[in-house]
Image (cartoon, coloured by chain):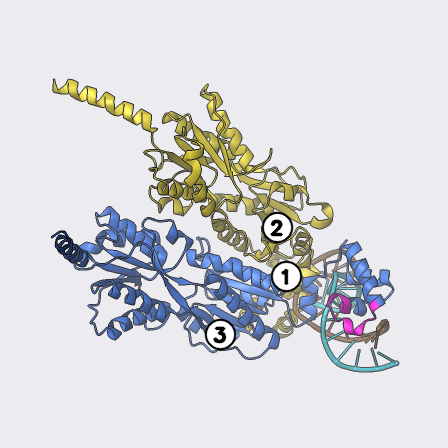
Chain colours: A yellow, B blue, C cyan, D brown
Amino acid sequence: MRVTLKDIADEAGVSMMTVSNVVNGKRARVSPDTIERIQRIVAERGYVPSASARSLAAKSSRLIGLLVPAADEDSLMISPHNVAIVGQIERELRKGGYHLLLRGIAEPAEVAEALQSWSLDGAVLLGFLDEEIDRLTPRTIGKVSLLAIDSYSANPLTTGVRSDDFTGALLAARHLISLGHSEIVFASPSFSSVGVVHQRYEGFRAAFAEAGMEWRERLVTVETTTHAQGRSLGLRLMSEHPDATAVFATADILAIGIMEGLAESGFSVPADVSVLGFDDLDLSRYVTPKLTTIAQDIPQKAQIAVRQLLATVESREHLTDPITLDVRLIERDSTASPPVLVRAGLEEQDARGQRDVE
Amino acid sequence: MRVTLKDIADEAGVSMMTVSNVVNGKRARVSPDTIERIQRIVAERGYVPSASARSLAAKSSRLIGLLVPAADEDSLMISPHNVAIVGQIERELRKGGYHLLLRGIAEPAEVAEALQSWSLDGAVLLGFLDEEIDRLTPRTIGKVSLLAIDSYSANPLTTGVRSDDFTGALLAARHLISLGHSEIVFASPSFSSVGVVHQRYEGFRAAFAEAGMEWRERLVTVETTTHAQGRSLGLRLMSEHPDATAVFATADILAIGIMEGLAESGFSVPADVSVLGFDDLDLSRYVTPKLTTIAQDIPQKAQIAVRQLLATVESREHLTDPITLDVRLIERDSTASPPVLVRAGLEEQDARGQRDVE
DNA sequence: CTGAAAGCGCTTACAG
DNA sequence: CTGAAAGCGCTTACAG
């Protein structure tokens, strides 16, 4: 049925080994003539090597897993922010001659099965909590190289790639402070003393410290980072924090929901309240007003993640240290000076106007 | 290193075959005692069967491919509309005990390699043009079952699952006609005489026919279905079609771009121009005004696609006939009566108002 | 530069 | 209810 190495070898009148060497590019060991002849036959017959056979015989499968949390009855939990990463990871792997197994994980025990059943050479963990990564043991991981995206887990069995969350939040807070805000709400999912959100919290506070200001802690949390939760938060935000003039949300999708809730409850963004997000989703440019946010370079993140993972897979060396990527502030239309300052400015302007007329 | 069938067999004092039968649930052939003992050992040792070995020995790999077009230097071409499908497909496959290989296809020749190298049992084609699917031959497909999503290709080697595009466009046009519109622009990527967009075009025209109206053909096309192309289309739309009072776009992302272009060039949606999309992306509820659109049941589409594919994979029977899924109109805020009618209505109202006062 | 042999971890008939 | 043998399509040392 299927064309095999042996078929090609028979037709070329050589051993399977020689065909194998040609197919795998180990040309130094075969004469140019033979190479040319074998390649012609391979093309003619449409020979495609069996990856399972190769995986079984060699110690490498050239298969990388992409593990994503999945509530059992739900779909994969790929946040809008993570969607772009999936495609980029596939592309980088394909360029490197690897294949991608996409796997949802409904419960911790499935990780071992996912890693071992196809003898994965490595896996990328996308969207897991640091606590979950901390719990990974040698028994479930085996000898598979693991790289977690957006993780601050200290588990020595894994490495990671993440954005500079601390600096991102620092830039966000600096921007709001420079506009004259001091009463700022920090909106996020609930967080512990480690992880992405905690880093952003620390960066946010650091901006106040460096400005010599004191931040009156205004924390609001959502159960899940969704538009719906953001909206309901936006609806009640100003009654819970009547003095607030700005909100920093740890995700664009949350910020966009907050803007909608704010608008529905009669507040104008940014005239009454400024809103600042994190991620720079495409979506952030489609909503009104366009969202000011912290941008991450997603293609770069995926590229570095894959390269780092493949480096350890191919060298079979120890995991490299975690890598942290730069972020930057993207100013759009959802942030402005707080209402009191704007009014003060207008009065000043009126005064000057009068002077000019005189 | 790895725990194998043989390890379990030795420890249990039975043959590999017996362990294999237990692991694969063929319990009828083994005594209850033995089953219980083997299962305990399997759990203790953390035995995970080797999928490559099983794939090589059996005729089935329990691996399904998800093939997606990919420009070489670009990421996977997963449209916002297709993003949701990926996660759903993975979930359905996992529930059925299959694994998912996600593969970008940069050129046609890669399809054969993608299908054969891991001996896929089947594959889902997502985002390919009908012309590309038409060109698939037995040589590249082999005996792999293929299902194309959103395809109208007549290639007998594949089957398909798609939404009722004809009816969707019919509902869209009926809605606009019932609001009083007659000068409607049809915005889409360029299309041939077959395929999703052509179906929508036919459905759109059918609504005019059934209303006994003549549609003054106003076609505008974009190169790619993106927000940016929609925006630039929206910017020039009213100068190219000054009499138009509505636009039907064949994709939400396009419609949302058009709304932005329209707004930038000083037209109000829906007061001046109504806009209607297709897909019902989450995004459609986040923009202002919220987009009226045609909804497809994405989870259902993914679920039916997988079930249909697995049915032919497991029965090894012929491919089933293509399935067409229902769609429905979601009325939101981007459609209203055309300006002249609104004005006429207001005058009428004024007149009535006066009568009431008298 | 080329080859014969063993083995990767399973499943599939075929026997008993 | 259970087992011994062959084989799936490759790669890996080891020889020549």
Of callouts 1 and 2, which one flags the residue occurring earlier in the amino acid sequence? 1
Residue B134 percent across, percent down from the top left: 43, 73
- Quarter where residue A263 is shown: top left
Circle 3 chain: B
Q: Is residue A354 magenta?
A: no
The kind of secondary structure element at disc 1 is: helix
Query: Which one is closest to the eye, mark 1 or mark 2?
Result: 2
Query: Which one is closest to the eye, mark 1 or mark 3?
Result: 3
The kind of secondary structure element at disc 2 is: strand
How crowded pointer 2 is (Cα within 10 Å; few <14, some 14-19, many 20+) is rated as many
Q: Nearer the viewer, residue B225 or A2?
A: B225
Instruction: Considering the whole magenta stretch, tell me its main secondary structure.
Output: helix
Label 2 with label 3: CB-CB less than 8 Å = no
Q: Nearer the viewer, residue B122 or B335?
A: B335
Q: Is residue B23 magenta?
A: yes
A352 above or below A59? above
Q: Nearer the viewer, residue B354 or A62?
A: B354
